Image (tube, rainbow, N blue to C red):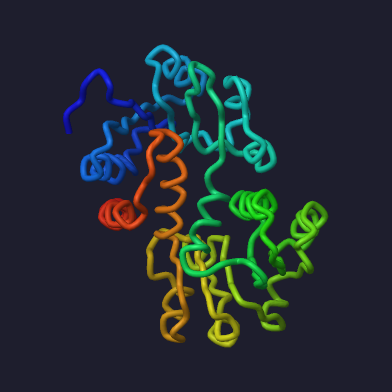
């Protein structure tokens, strides 16, 4: 990689020396011929990092350690509507000196689902009400996609809150109700099968769906993914999600299109090294 005066400097902001992504995005930039470099900057104080961003005139930053930091939005010049709704800033763009906070998870998940099927006129069964779920629903609404959602969560009241915000969410329920529903696309937006060891997605549930999507990326072959493969379902894994949310960030930060197939190759190589 040849660094020159035109090289775009993109920061990874974290509270500690956490290098995840450096071994993914830099090899991708080199193979794709994109004149950019991804560098780690870490400090426990987001103000220090944002001041450094301005001083160095970075092209942008991925806020890996500060997504939900309460101080960060006030340090920026603007926060987009998606990030405001979610309450999470995933990356920062530099728009001629104006620093703008964005969220990539919802659009990343939408692209992940679209990589295996259209959402039009389909029924999604979604488990989870966290940041990715909020972002996904926001993205669906913004794109005017005609679909319906059945939303499930351990705490049913949180699902009801989201139902009140989006007209396409037809029903809500707790995890105990999953065996009673069916649909076209099953989407896990929780840590079930990843950092959460209990496994609620048995084959009698998964068999009802044609498409299975998992957000968990501690390993690619989660119990949900393994079950779906055994049932010959069409699958998008957490590593696909990692790829597409990376695509969202990198396209915004570099101003160039990002090939998801090429990027996924580097995601697989990088996560295989860093995710245990």
Residue 147 vertical position relative to residue 105 in the rendered view, above or below: below
Q: Residue 47 versus residue 109: which sits nearer the camera?
A: 109
Quadrant housing the N terminus: top left
Residue 246 at x, y percent in the picture: 42, 46
Q: Quadrant of the C terminus?
A: bottom left
Q: So how many labels did they put on this image?
A: 0
One can see residue 215 in this view: yes
Vertical placement of residue 269 versus 71, above or below: below
Of residues 117 and 50, the one drawn nearer to the viewer in this rendering:
117
The answer to whether one can see residue 130 in this image is no
At horizontal 68% and vertical 72% (from top left) the residue drawn is 175
Decide if residue 171 is on the left or right side of residue 233: right
Residue drawn 79% across the image and 54% down it: 161
Residue placed furthest toward the top: 55
Q: Position of residue 29 (x, y in %)?
A: 27, 40
Q: In which quarter of the view is residue 120 placed? A: bottom right
Residue at image coords 54%, 71%: 198
Q: Toward the viewer: 194 or 124? A: 124
In the rendering, at what x and y percent does residue 47 appear? 51, 18
Most extreme residue toward the right is 164
Displayed quadrant of residue 40:
top left
**Image quarter for residue 98?**
top right
Using the image, determine if residue 1 lies above or below residue 105: above
Q: Residue sitting at 43 percent across and 30 percent down?
A: 61
């Amino acid at each position: 990689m040849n660094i020159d005066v035109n090289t775009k400097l993109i920061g990874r902001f974290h509270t500690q020396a956490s290098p995840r992504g450096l071994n993914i995005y830099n090899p991708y930039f080199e193979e794709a011929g994109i004149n950019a470099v991804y560098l780690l900057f870490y400090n426990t104080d987001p103000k220090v990092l944002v001041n450094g961003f301005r001083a160095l005139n970075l092209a942008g930053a991925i806020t890996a350690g500060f997504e939900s930091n309460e101080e960060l939005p006030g340090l920026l010049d603007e926060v987009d509507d998606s990030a405001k709704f979610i309450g999470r800033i995933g990356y920062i763009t530099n728009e001629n000196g104006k620093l703008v906070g964005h969220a990539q998870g919802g659009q990343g998940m939408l692209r992940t689902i679209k990589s295996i099927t259209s959402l039009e006129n389909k029924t999604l069964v979604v488990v989870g009400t966290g940041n990715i779920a909020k972002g996904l629903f926001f993205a669906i609404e913004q794109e005017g996609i005609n679909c319906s959602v059945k939303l499930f969560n351990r705490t049913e009241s949180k699902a009801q809150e989201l139902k009140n915000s989006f007209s396409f969410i037809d029903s809500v329920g707790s995890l105990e109700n999953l065996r009673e529903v069916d649909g076209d696309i099953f989407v896990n937006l929780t840590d079930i099968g990843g950092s959460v060891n209990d496994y609620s997605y048995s084959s009698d549930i998964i068999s009802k769906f044609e498409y299975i999507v998992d957000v968990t990326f501690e390993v690619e072959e989660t119990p949900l993914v393994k079950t779906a493969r055994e049932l010959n379902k069409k699958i998008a894994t957490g590593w696909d999600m990692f790829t597409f949310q990376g695509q969202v960030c990198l396209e915004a930060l570099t101003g160039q299109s990002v090939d998801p197939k090429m990027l996924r190759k580097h995601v697989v190589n990088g996560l295989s090294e860093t995710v245990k």
